[in-house]
Amino acid sequence: MDKTQEKLKGYTFIEKIGEGTYGLVWKAKNNINGQIVAIKEFKIKRKGVEYDGIPSTVLREISYLKKLNYHINVVELVEIISNTNGLFLVLEYIELDVHSLLYAKNPYKDSRLPNLVVKVY
């Protein structure tokens, strides 16, 4: 078992919560401390096709998250896990996203709205 598989075994994947151009987002639980996290899984290989490295947008996202980590208004980057098939960003889990808030019928009913908008923005 390689280090990536070992690190990923430290998390229990609960459910898929999103899908994008480069991969999937999972809700997961840290098996050691019980923390709920979001794991962004970026595929480097997909269905026999090998990407030409990690996309620049992914590298840019990682760079910004590392620079802005621990800022109150930015999602916390907990851990980066990688291997030859993929890259996994373990992030602070936030229940709602900006899209959901913008298109909610009455978003101001939710008392968490100001904090969530600031945190996600």
Image: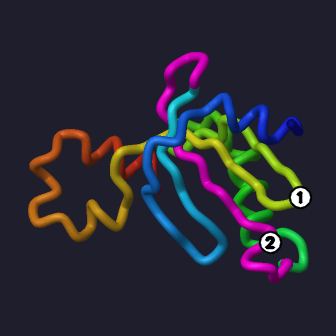
Q: Which residue is nearer to you in this view: 108 or 11?
A: 11
Q: Vertically, is 63 above or below 111?
A: below
Label 1 – label 2 distance at C-alpha = 8 Å
Amino acid carrying label 2: it is Lys
**Is residue 54 covered in magenta?**
no
Q: Vertically, is 117 above or below 55?
A: above
Task: Please give the label number shown on residue 45.
Answer: 2
Q: Which residues are magenta?
A: 31-50
Q: Is residue 85 left or right of 36 when viewed as pictured?
A: right
Q: Vertically, is 109 above or below 72?
A: below
Numbered disc 2: secondary structure:
strand
Identity of the residue drawn at 81% across and 82% down:
49
The answer to whether marks 1 and 2 mark residues whose Cβ atoms lie closer than 8 Å is yes
Identity of the residue drawn at 16% across and 45% down:
110
Amino acid carrying label 1: it is Thr
Q: How would you rate the neighbour count of disc 2 (Cα within 10 Å): few for under 14, some for 14-19, many for 20 or more?
A: some
Q: Quadrant of residue 104?
A: bottom left
Q: Is residue 96 left or right of 32 when viewed as pictured?
A: left
Q: How would you rate the neighbour count of disc 1 (Cα within 10 Å): few for under 14, some for 14-19, many for 20 or more?
A: few
- Residue 81 in the image: state x and y as whole percent: 78, 44
Q: Which residue is mark 1?
A: 84
